[in-house]
Image (cartoon, helix red, strand yellow):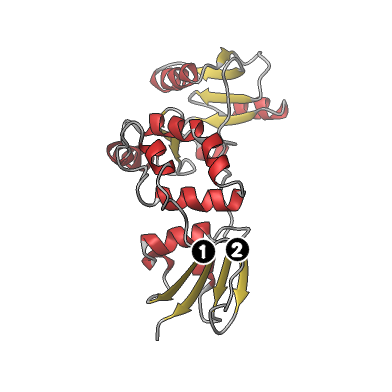
Amino acid sequence: MSLAALPIFVKLAGRPVILIGAGEAADAKRRLLDRAGAQIVDEGGSAALAIVAVDDPEPVVARLRARGVLVNAVDRADLCDFTLPAIVDRDPVLVAIGTGGVSAGLAAALRQRLEAVLPASLGGFARALAAARPAMRDRWPDPGERRRALGTALAGPLDPLAAQSNGAVERWLGDPAATAPGFQHFALTSPDPDQLTLHQARALAQADRVFHRADVPESILDRARADAARIACDAPPVAPESGLSVYLEMRA
């Protein structure tokens, strides 16, 4: 399944962005660009991005595209080279919700739901994880083992959806049991990937290898990391290699 658009985060601090238009819609975009630290310029300015908020955007968009500028036309998804998502800000964590311009109202509703779910302390927790990188490298020199240990912690004692107290990361690092399992075996009850348990979905997302019977649907296998090896087999491996291996079969 192809992506309608590739989500990216662009650093705009000190960079020029063209903003054309007046009124409430243009003012809202101006505030957003100001928050990002962009340097707002008019149509004659040199910039890679432009936001157009006018009643008749087609000729303006055509002129800008002829110069190689990527354009967002407010309320005209058909003219947009890029769209602006609804944003949940837990600096340095940013969550962006986009609908490709189909429904800004839906994106706003999802943002409101996520605002209530993501704790206000999430940004501080992210910084604590960044500060702990040297200690994590010392404990788990192998990158794969380090990634799996952190993934297991984020699915348990360091749950990012729970408010983490000061020192939570340090306490986890000091726990001798803070390791990741090397092999997991799942008998799935449904071919629907949305019926995976949270534990099963997280294991697939972290696995280095996915062993599976032939009847496991592609839609479930696609929940694994893109670089995870897929090995079709009729029985679990006798001696899985190092790292995390998962064996999947469908329950009769």
Residue 64 is situated, as x and y percent measured from the top left of the image, at 66, 25
Q: Identify the residue under disc 2.
A: 242
For the image, the number of numbered tags is 2
Question: Amino acid under label 1?
Answer: Gly
79 in relation to 210, above or below? above
Q: Assess disc 2: are there few (<14), some (14-19) or many (≥20) residues with their C-alpha within 10 Å of its C-alpha.
A: few
Of residues 220 and 134, which is closer to you in this image?
A: 134
164 in relation to 219, above or below? above
Task: Point out the image quarter for the N terminus.
Answer: bottom right
60 in relation to 208, above or below? above
Residue 210 is situated, as x and y percent measured from the top left of the image, at 56, 69
Instruction: Report the residue at 40% width, 46% height from top.
Output: 175
206 in relation to 232, above or below? above
Label 1: element kind: loop
- Label number found at residue 182: 1
Question: Amino acid under label 2?
Answer: Ser
Instruction: Report the residue at 40% width, 33% height from top.
Output: 125
Instruction: Report the residue at 46% width, 54% height from top.
Output: 179
Asked if the residues shown at circle 2 and circle 1 are in contact, with their CB atoms under 8 angstroms apart, the answer is yes
Residue 35 is situated, as x and y percent measured from the top left of the image, at 46, 19
Residue 96 is situated, as x and y percent measured from the top left of the image, at 45, 37
C-alpha distance separating marks 2 and 1: 7 Å
Of residues 156 and 73, which is closer to you in this image?
A: 156
Of residues 186 and 33, which is closer to you in this image?
A: 186
N-term mark: 2 or 1: 1
| Furthest residue in direction left, as rendered | 116
User: Quarter of the image holding residue 137?
Assistant: top right
Label 2: element kind: loop
